[in-house]
């Protein structure tokens, strides 16, 4: 057993296998992260708002978790493979556009099919891209170079107001253009609040 461990360690530390192991580890990390993110979210949302028997709910939770996990694993490994390939076409040097091109192709291949899970992942990533355009807060010169800088407080305040004003207007006037999950949540929050026929219904009604 010790000999096997030492052999595997030598392989892992061998520069000749670095790129292959990078792709493999990216796939592993994508699968683990996808499962960690999706399973608790699907579990809570399905049992709070989902319909069907407990068996059907568990099947949905496992399917959503598997899809999220596999898609992130495939994207992460494909992205790292393409980055390595592009770098090798430039004498081993990475170019600024390499990450965009690798992400562009990976996003099209892995997340291009419109499914519930893919749509949620893409919309989440889109929100992060939009928020990245907001001005950053002032930080001291000693602030770590690669640590994310928080959004400027005043800019976020304005951004939050615009987002909520827009989404509520869309919900009331253009709901057909919104994501289905968002509409269902907002129906529960705002439309359902207008309907009751007694105290018990007011407290427990969930449709």
Image: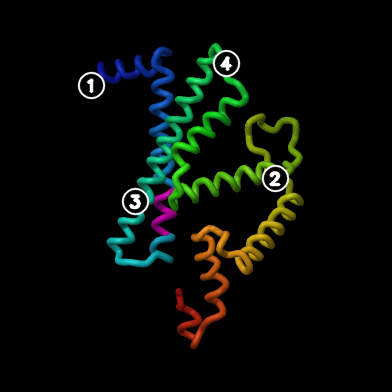
> Secondary structure under badge 4?
loop
Circle nearer the N terminus (3, 4): 3
Camera-near label (4 vs 1) is 4
Element marked by disc 2: loop
- Residue behind mark 1: 1
Q: Which residue is mark 4?
A: 93
Q: Which quarter of the figure has residue 94?
A: top right
* Residue 96 image position (x, y, % from top left): 62, 24
Q: Say left or right for 141 vs 61.
A: right
Which residue is most to the left? 1
Q: Are marks 4 and 2 in contact (CB under 8 Å)?
A: no
Dot in front, 1 or 3: 3
Magenta stretch, main secondary structure class: helix
**Separation of residues labelled 4 and 1 (CA atoms):** 39 Å
The reply to whether dot 3 and dot 4 touch (C-beta < 8 Å) is no
Q: Which residue is mark 2?
A: 151
Nearer the observer, 201 or 119: 119
**Which of pointers 3 and 2 indicates the residue nearer the eye?**
3
Judge the density around disc 4: few (<14), some (14-19), many (≥20) Cα neighbours within 10 Å. few
Query: Residue visible at 33% across and 61% down?
Result: 57
- As measured in the structure, the alpha-carbon distance from the residue carrying label 4 to the one carrying label 2 is 32 Å
Q: Is residue 9 left or right of residue 206?
A: left
Task: Tell me the CA gap for discs 3 and 2.
Answer: 36 Å
Q: Are marks 2 and 1 in contact (CB under 8 Å)?
A: no
Q: CA distance from mark 1 to mark 3?
A: 37 Å
Please give the range of residues in magenta. 38-44
**Element carrying mark 1:** loop
Q: Residue at x 72, y 30 (%)?
A: 142
Who comes first in sequence, dot 1 or dot 3? Answer: 1
Q: Earlier in the sequence, mark 2 or mark 1?
A: 1
Mark 2 Cα-neighbour bin, 10 Å: few <14, some 14–19, many ≥20:
some
């Amino acid at each position: 057993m010790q000999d096997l461990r030492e052999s595997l360690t030598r392989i892992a530390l061998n520069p000749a296998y670095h790129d292959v192991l990078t792709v493999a580890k990216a796939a592993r990390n994508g699968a683990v992260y996808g499962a960690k993110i999706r399973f608790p979210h699907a579990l809570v949302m399905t049992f709070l708002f989902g319909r069907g028997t407990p068996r059907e709910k568990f099947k949905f939770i496992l399917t959503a978790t598997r899809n999220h996990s596999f898609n992130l694993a495939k994207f992460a490994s494909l992205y790292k493979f393409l980055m390595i390939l592009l770098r090798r076409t430039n004498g081993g040097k990475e170019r600024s556009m390499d990450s965009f091109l690798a992400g562009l192709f990976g996003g099209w291949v892995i997340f291009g099919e419109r499914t519930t899970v893919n749509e949620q992942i893409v919309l989440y990533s889109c929100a992060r891209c939009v928020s990245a355009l907001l001005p950053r807060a002032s930080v001291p010169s000693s602030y770590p170079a690669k640590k994310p800088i928080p959004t400027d407080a005043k800019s976020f305040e304005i951004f939050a107001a615009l987002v909520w004003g827009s989404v509520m207007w869309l919900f009331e006037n253009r709901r057909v253009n919104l994501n289905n999950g968002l509409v269902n949540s907002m129906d529960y929050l705002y439309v359902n609040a207008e309907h009751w026929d007694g105290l018990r219904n007011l407290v427990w009604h969930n449709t």
